[in-house]
Amino acid sequence: MSEDRGRWGSRTGFILAATGSAVGLGNIWGFPTQVGQGGGAAFVLVYLVAVLFICAPILLGEIVVGRYSQLGPMGAVRRLAPTGPWWLIGILAVSAGTFILSFYSVIAGWTVQYLWLAVTGGLESGPEASGALFTELAGQSWRNIFATGLFLAVTAWCVNRGIKRGIEAAARIMMPVLFVLLMILAVRAVTLPGAGEGLAYYLRPDLSQLRDPGILGAAVGQAFFSLSLGMGALITYGSYLHRSHKIRSAAMAIVGIDTLIALLAGFIIFPAGFSIAGFDPATGGPGLIFAVLPQLFATLPGGLIFGAAFFLLLSVAAFTSTISLLEVPVSHAIDQWRWSRRKAAATVGLFCFVVSIPCALSFGGGPAALADLPVIGGSFFDLMVNVWNEWALPIGGLLISLFVGWRWGVAHAGKELRREGPGFPSPKLWGVLIRFVSPAALVFLILLRIAS
Ligand code: PFF
């Protein structure tokens, strides 16, 4: 095995790093946005069902493939299924990791700039100015390219340090910080005047909303992104485990913590949002976090500390996710092309930076065509989100579930799980879910996307 491949120092290190991958902008921004657009508590219910029955089995499937093969997605499928089109999983994984990182790091760059503004008093401009501030910030091309590049450079530096000294060490520091910040913010938010209305919106489901099949599609899509599924991130992380490490309880912990943190983010955003006059929970997109919340920070006593803590939280969460996005193509280059870790981290990081430039210029401040692409409509950034999040991840997830459930097969995978002794989920229950339930739900989601 190549020196540069590396290994986790402990099972806890793996759990922290994988949870760090899962917990990101998707939890703190994406989840509340989807709840707001999907009608509140009803969405939360469907989300929980999607996580448990559709996504968790795939998460365990990815980890078991990684631990068994001790290889990233491409190497694993080539070893376990040398014939057939399964190498597509490897191609999808490497490209999704690279391209998702390219736009994800632009948003991460904004979070760092907002953190800077909060610390230096730049958010004090007053409530009305918050929307304008975001439009202005997003349109400042050079600053955004610089912030994105900086974020990517720190990510590449950490990945270059390797599995144990880089990724695991970062997660060990960042994850507790993230949790403490979340708790402080949630307590602050639910004690704001007007918070009750937000809590009711978040917690009291309007069951008539469940008639809309779109909710299930949105919930599965969100859960997929949130759990870092469909692009082999967990195959890669699983491949750095010892064959003797137990993964069933680890998978449950990752799913549990990721979901808990998404739910906690809702306890911050909705009470905080509803405490502002005229708040509309359906304001999705960047507006929710970057324009709405600073209004609150600007008016609260001590709000700037609250604001700084919030943007620090977002930056930390984004960082542990960008690390895993970069690690997928980097481990591919190490395994398949025999590159050194240093060369891989630098080259892929640089490539992502180049692709991130048109993403960063999609919000004004660049050529007009990037903000509104001819023929396709929407910005270059929107196009990237659409292709990679909305299509590549569900298609990758479908292929992975079919691969594990039918090609490599639950007989083999189940045997690998049974080595751990009894535990939850039983290999039998898991086998049924990954063979039938997850693929059926993903086919449904893909058909829904085609129809819309
Ligand atoms: N799970 C991350 C989030 O919720 O923000 C995003 C992500 C990271 C997706 C890593 C995919 C991935 F491989």
Image (tube, rainbow, N blue to C red):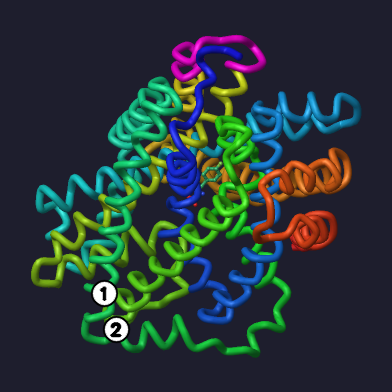
| Rendered view: 13 above or below 334 | below
Q: Quadrant of residue 332?
A: top right
Q: Is residue 91 visible?
A: no
Q: CA distance from mark 1 to mark 2?
A: 7 Å
Q: Residue shown at 27%/82% (left/top)? A: 277
Q: Position of residue 89 (x, y in %)?
A: 74, 35
Identify which residue, 127 or 416, lies in the foreground.
416
Depth order, front residue of 421/286 = 421
Type of the residue with mark 2: Ala
Residue 274 rendering spot, x and y as whole percentages: 33, 80
Q: In screen coordinates, is 414 left or right of 323?
A: right
Q: Amino acid at mark 1?
A: Ala
Task: Evaluate whether residue 182 shows in this view.
Answer: yes
In this picture, which residue range is highlighted in magenta? 334-347
Q: Are marks 1 and 2 in contact (CB under 8 Å)?
A: yes
Tell me the SS state at disc 1: helix
Give above or below for 326 relative to 4.
Answer: below
Magenta region includes residue 339: yes
Which residue lies under the disc numbered 2? 195
Residue 230: x %, y % from top left: 67, 45
Residue in the foreground of this view, choosing between 107 and 137: 107
* 209 is within the stretch colored magenta: no
Is the magenta region chiefly helix, strand or loop?
Answer: helix
Give the percent coordinates (x, y) of residue 326: 50, 30
Task: Identify the residue under disc 1.
Answer: 189
